[in-house]
């Protein structure tokens, strides 16, 4: 890997994954397809408006797909695509780094 | 890994790594210790003020250390600490995901 030159693809990836809330949303969806309210439950500080916006962005870059089940009431679920699913290695390495390195005093109250 | 509960350590890690410019700065420093201007050279769109701010933040969370060499003129270099160096697996997995999944049309002009 060439650390002496910045890579435009890496820049795009960091912009997507690093965006506020996105890293948390992807982590939730790695557990399987979820409804809007199930995602919210794990990230309660995030507003509905923000989650809606992020889900649209993630759909537009092909990381999340939206499935509408024509039931009564209608059921809508979000799932990772193959592109989204392949973020698993990144999310797991962040999780394991955090377990080793994030200290008690750094935890948000 | 438990995807059904959000992890506070993971949240802190995502906040650190995901912050604008930080993912790029860490990638540069994985190549070895660097001077301010060497970091800037790889991330020219970032302002001096922003880089100064980020380096202070990264020092304060123990990811970067600052070394002052008493030469004339004085030489100041930034390096990853052990905590920072252990972000390598994350950065490499983001790089390899981006090479597989980021498309030509997504690249920033």
Image: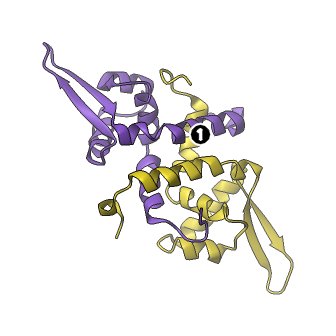
Chain colours: A purple, B yellow
Residue at 71 percent of width and 66 percent of height = B32
Residue at 46 percent of width and 33 percent of height = A27
Quadrant in the picture for the C terminus of chain A: top right
Regarding residue A96, the answer to whether it shows in the image is yes
Residue B23 image point, x, y percent: 55, 56
Residue A16 image point, x, y percent: 40, 50
- The outermost residue toward the front is B100
Assess disc 1: are there few (<14), some (14-19) or many (≥20) residues with their C-alpha within 10 Å of its C-alpha. some
- The outermost residue toward the bottom is B72
Q: Mark 1 — on which chain does it sit? A: A
Quadrant in the picture for the N terminus of chain A: bottom right
* Element type at mark 1: helix
Residue B83 image point, x, y percent: 73, 48
Q: Quadrant of residue A55?
A: top left
- Above-or-below relation of A93 to A3: above
Q: Quadrant of residue B50?
A: bottom right
- Above-or-below relation of B88 to B31: above
Q: Quadrant of residue B102?
A: bottom left
Regarding residue A109, the answer to whether it shows in the image is no
Specify whether B97 is left or right of A48. Answer: right
| Residue labelled with disc 1 | A93
- Quick one: B17 or B53, which is closer to the camera? B17
Residue at 46 percent of width and 41 percent of height = A87
Residue B34 image point, x, y percent: 70, 70
Specify whether B61 is left or right of A9. Answer: right
């Amino acid at each position: 890997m060439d650390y002496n030159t910045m890579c435009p693809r890496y820049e795009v990836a960091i912009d997507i994954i690093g965006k506020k809330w996105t890293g948390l949303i992807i982590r939730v969806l790695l557990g399987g397809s979820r409804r809007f309210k199930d995602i919210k439950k794990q990230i309660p500080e995030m507003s509905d408006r923000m989650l809606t916006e992020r889900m649209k962005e993630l759909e537009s870059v092909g990381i999340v797909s939206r499935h509408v089940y024509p039931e009564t009431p209608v059921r809508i679920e979000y799932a990772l695509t193959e592109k989204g699913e392949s973020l698993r290695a990144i999310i797991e390495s962040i999780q394991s780094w955090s377990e080793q390195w994030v200290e008690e005093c750094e935890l948000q109250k």
